[in-house]
């Protein structure tokens, strides 16, 4: 397979003045008739006429009405074309019923739907399927199905057909079509300039009762984008469709967002607080793409983070406004440390703007999305809120209707703020998580912080240059008062010192407040500092970080057979009793660092992490906490019980999350009595799943698990929870056998990505189970990846990342994983997707 390089970018030699598509839908032999008006681009160098096309049957092709015979290859076609403007017409056929890849046009439970990002449109018809080719589309759909949807505004419709026109030029990856027997929740929104927008949320009959929250979230997002970014919606309709078979969360097609049903459907009895929050976030994310992604798109796929990093940053701001910035930031840091740092420190590390790829689907990663968002957060911190707003206004003004680059993005910041961003740009090109070592000194009323930054080598990047790292700092005096409010220090050199004068006493530093940069802080903090910050820091993030530091030390102590510091539990208990802290923040204080984080930290200390030992240490620390907080936990749990109907508002969610965090610990000391009672009484899915999880985590809950299955056997999204909960929480020695058994369960539908993830993804997220020393977990996953690859390469490749940490394991586990990776690599007919991933992991 060919490697594509950023440096090789060349523009498409033609401009498209209009695209007309007619779809005659059929499970096999859907006929797509295209009429595309091309005109030479005066600004582009001439080149051959090449249209992408894969797995298509070309029935006929014409240029200006005259039949032509193009040269067809598995990747597309070339054809001799006139030197001036011309009209290309083609008739092709494709088979939605046979499309198990879920890319292009496919059938999901009798419903036609599309997924064109990144390169799916070429499976629908021949086209320059690249994001810098933008065109106005008119679409006619012919089918007897009652609901026929596409992008833009509806035009005509009648028995067996409907036409849609999208006035906004767009790249083909934003094309969408849906046809099915669907029902809708309708609503409307009036934009601030008075445009009336009809909103529709389309689902399969039976799911009507799960649409209200998605619709509320959509209206909240539309309002927020007007208020926070001055961005208004620009069509007469906005439709969302729920699809059961979908590779990712959702897709931002212009005016017709398509969602994995797990990311849009929610009702109190079937969805948890976390599901509600996820729906709200993903609806917002896809909606925000209307400006950051659709109106301004990417010149090429190397610029993917231009739309994804920015849109994640925007959805983070939105969720912060809806649910509290402190807890949101903590959640983002947990995700980053658990997944992005792992990616950045392993064989799959790549820059926020990669320089090459074989299969672009493999680059929809936590680095592109979450690290990309962090880079924007740093930029905002460096130029300030006003500078950020000016830069964004300029970005929308200058690049509306264009396919832009990272250079364009940084230039608007330079032009709007006068700041030179040449060094900052390294965040886009250098992979790896920077480490910032901080040492302090105190002399004659002068306090000094010496910082050193290092960025470890990553594949293809042995040497790194220092980057611009905003380090938000506060200083507290010994009685806990803040003597320096949050100040952003700019670390730009490899080594740099910052001094603070006129202090009456040696201060306590609160470093990297708000997690101001995606870096690892290295510091030998003096004894007692973390407990002090847990009690006194005014920065919510660093108060939580102090609790994490204490928990990390407790885990290390257990791992090393030492006693846990006796002051840990009392200092945590004091914070948990602090009524000035919101319940959601107190719930976060009860969370331990993930087993993945512990493994990575050990590896950073040049130790070989043993997943089994790490798991047992974490369990022992939880037991220790449960014992130490025994008197406090019942009242915290009681506080999570609320009378009245379920509400997903932030305050109620916070109370439930503290109550359920307490329940998880309580179940370690009360034989699961409270959890069993909560399960029996639960009136909503949040309380039910929390209780079931608490029981399973302590090796109980068999009976409840059975009851849960019987109650929810007909609800596919709840059944996914039934699968994933038990595998994710299984004891290490039982996890693989359980996952294996569940793959034989009559409800296990391996071609459905949600169900596949619910079993095999849950196994991979149970580190001690997956890394069982026998290698059975590796074998099971490899078997299933090989099988899935034949049907759905994109999903198989994404799941293969479970193997990416193999180099930090002991030699026996390394050999076992290497052998499985070798077995995958040797599988006949391996996809480009999976073979690229395995190749990169093996190195
Ligand atoms: N922009 C969307 C990405 C996406 C996707 C990419 C490849 C294959 C399938 C896909 N489904 C959705 C989602 C987003 O970031 O909003
Ligand atoms: Zn996105």
Image: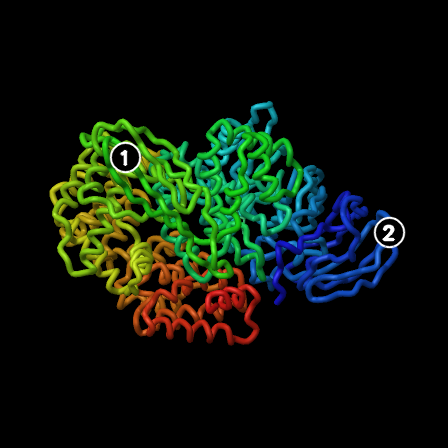
- What is the C-alpha distance between the residues marked 1 and 2? 72 Å
Classify residue 406 by image quadrant: top right
Report x, y in % for residue 306: 56, 44
Q: Quadrant of residue 543?
A: top left
Nearest the viewer among 800 and 530 is 530
Q: Is residue 239 above or below residue 415?
A: below
Q: Is residue 154 left or right of residue 307?
A: right
Checking the image for residue 447, the label placed there is 1
Residue at (84, 60) in percent of width and height = 68
Residue 409: % across, % down: 58, 39
Q: Is residue 628 left or right of residue 319?
A: left
Q: Residue at x 36, y 31 (%)?
A: 487
In-front residue for pair 450/826: 450
Give the number of the disc on residue 733.
none
Please state the horizontal and vertical placement of residue 798, each as a whole percent of the image. Answer: 48, 60
Residue 234 on image: x %, y %: 62, 32
Q: Secondary structure at mark 2?
A: loop
Rendered position, 456 above or below 737: above
Mark 2, ligand 1, within 8 Å: the answer is: no
Q: Which residue of the protein is positioned furthest toward the front in this rendering?
A: 444
* Residue at mark 2: 83
Classify residue 540 as left or right of residue 377: left
């Amino acid at each position: 397979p060919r490697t594509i390089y950023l440096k090789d970018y060349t523009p498409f030699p033609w401009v498209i003045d209009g695209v007309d598509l007619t779809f005659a839908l059929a499970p096999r032999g859907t006929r797509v008739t295209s009429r595309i008006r091309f005109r030479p681009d005066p600004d582009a160098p001439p080149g051959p006429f090449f249209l992408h096309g894969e797995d298509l049957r070309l029935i006929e092709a014409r240029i200006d009405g005259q039949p032509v015979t193009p040269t067809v290859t598995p990747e597309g076609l070339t054809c001799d074309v006139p030197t001036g403007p011309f009209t290309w017409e083609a008739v092709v056929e494709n088979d939605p019923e046979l499309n198990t890849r879920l890319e292009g046009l496919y059938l999901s439970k009798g419903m036609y739907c599309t997924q064109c990002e990144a390169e799916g449109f070429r499976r629908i018809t021949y086209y320059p399927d690249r994001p810098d080719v933008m065109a106005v589309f008119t679409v006619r759909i012919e089918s007897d199905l009652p609901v026929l949807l596409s992008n833009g505004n509806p035009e005509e419709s009648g028995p067996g057909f409907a036409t849609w026109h999208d006035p906004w030029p767009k790249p083909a990856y934003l094309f969408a079509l849906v046809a099915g027997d669907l029902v809708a929740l309708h609503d409307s929104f009036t934009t601030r300039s008075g445009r009336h927008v009809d909103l529709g949320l389309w689902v399969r009959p039976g799911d009507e009762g799960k649409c209200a929250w998605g619709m509320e979230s959509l209206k909240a997002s539309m309002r927020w984008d007007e208020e926070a970014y001055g961005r208004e919606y620009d069509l007469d309709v906005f439709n969302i469709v729920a699809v059961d078979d979908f590779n990712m969360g959702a897709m931002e097609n212009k005016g017709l967002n398509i969602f994995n049903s797990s990311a849009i459907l929610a009702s109190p009895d079937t969805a948890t607080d976390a599901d509600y929050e996820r729906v709200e976030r993903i609806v917002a994310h896809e909606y925000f793409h209307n400006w950051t992604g659709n109106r301004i798109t990417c010149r090429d796929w190397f610029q993917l983070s231009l739309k994804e990093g920015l849109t994640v940053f925007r959805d983070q701001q939105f969720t912060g406004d809806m649910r509290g910035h402190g807890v949101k930031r903590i959640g983002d840091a947990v995700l980053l440390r658990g997944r992005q740092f792992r990616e950045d420190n392993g064989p799959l590390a790549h820059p926020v703007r990669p320089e090459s790829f074989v299969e672009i689907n493999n680059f929809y990663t936590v680095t592109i999305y979450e690290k990309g968002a962090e880079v924007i957060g740093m930029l905002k911190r460096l130029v300030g809120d006003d500078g950020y707003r000016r830069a964004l206004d300029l970005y929308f003004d200058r690049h509306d209707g264009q396919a832009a680059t990272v250079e364009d993005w940084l230039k608007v910041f330079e032009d709007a703020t006068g700041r030179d961003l040449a060094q900052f740009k390294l965040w886009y090109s250098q992979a790896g998580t920077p480490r910032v070592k901080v040492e302090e000194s105190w002399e004659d009323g002068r306090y000094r912080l010496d910082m050193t930054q290092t960025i470890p080598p990553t594949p293809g990047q042995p040497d790194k240059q220092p980057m611009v790292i905003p380090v938000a700092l506060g200083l507290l005096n010994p009685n806990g008062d803040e003597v320096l409010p949050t100040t952003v220090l700019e670390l730009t050199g490899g080594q740099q010192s910052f001094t603070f004068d006129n202090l009456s006493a040696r201060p306590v530093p609160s470093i990297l407040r708000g997690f101001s940069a995606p870096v690892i802080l290295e510091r030998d903090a003096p004894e007692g500092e973390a407990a002090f910050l847990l009690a006194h820091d005014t920065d919510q993030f660093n108060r939580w970080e102090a609790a994490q530091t204490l928990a990390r030390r407790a885990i290390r102590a257990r791992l090393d057979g030492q006693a846990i510091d006796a002051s840990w539990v009392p200092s945590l208990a004091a914070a948990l009793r602090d009524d000035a802290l919101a319940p959601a923040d107190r719930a976060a204080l009860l969370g331990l660092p993930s087993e993945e984080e512990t493994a990575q930290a050990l590896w950073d200390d040049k130790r070989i992490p043993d997943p089994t030992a790490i798991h047992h240490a974490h369990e022992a620390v939880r037991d220790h906490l449960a014992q130490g907080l025994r008197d406090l936990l019942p009242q915290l749990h009681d506080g999570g019980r609320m009378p009245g109907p379920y509400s997903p508002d932030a305050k109620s969610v916070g109370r439930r999350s503290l109550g359920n965090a307490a329940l998880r610990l309580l179940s370690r000391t009360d034989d699961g009595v409270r959890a069993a009672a909560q399960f029996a009484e639960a009136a909503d899915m949040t309380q039910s799943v929390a209780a079931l999880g608490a029981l399973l985590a302590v090796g109980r809950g068999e009976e409840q698990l059975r009851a849960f299955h019987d109650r929810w056997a007909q609800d596919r999204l709840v059944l996914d929870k039934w699968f994933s909960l038990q595998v994710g929480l299984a004891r290490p020695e039982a996890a693989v056998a359980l996952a294996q058994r569940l793959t034989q369960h009559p409800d296990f539908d391996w071609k459905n990505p949600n169900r596949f993830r619910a079993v095999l993804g849950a196994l991979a997220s149970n580190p001690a189970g997956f890394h069982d020393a026998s290698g059975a977990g590796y074998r099971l996953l490899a078997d299933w990846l090989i099988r899935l690859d034949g049907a759905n390469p994109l999903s198989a490749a994404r799941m293969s990342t479970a193997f990416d940490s193999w180099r930090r394991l002991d030699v026996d586990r390394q050999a076992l994983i290497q052998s499985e990776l070798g077995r995958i690599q040797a599988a006949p007919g391996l996809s480009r997707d999976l073979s690229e991933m395995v190749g990169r992991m093996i190195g």
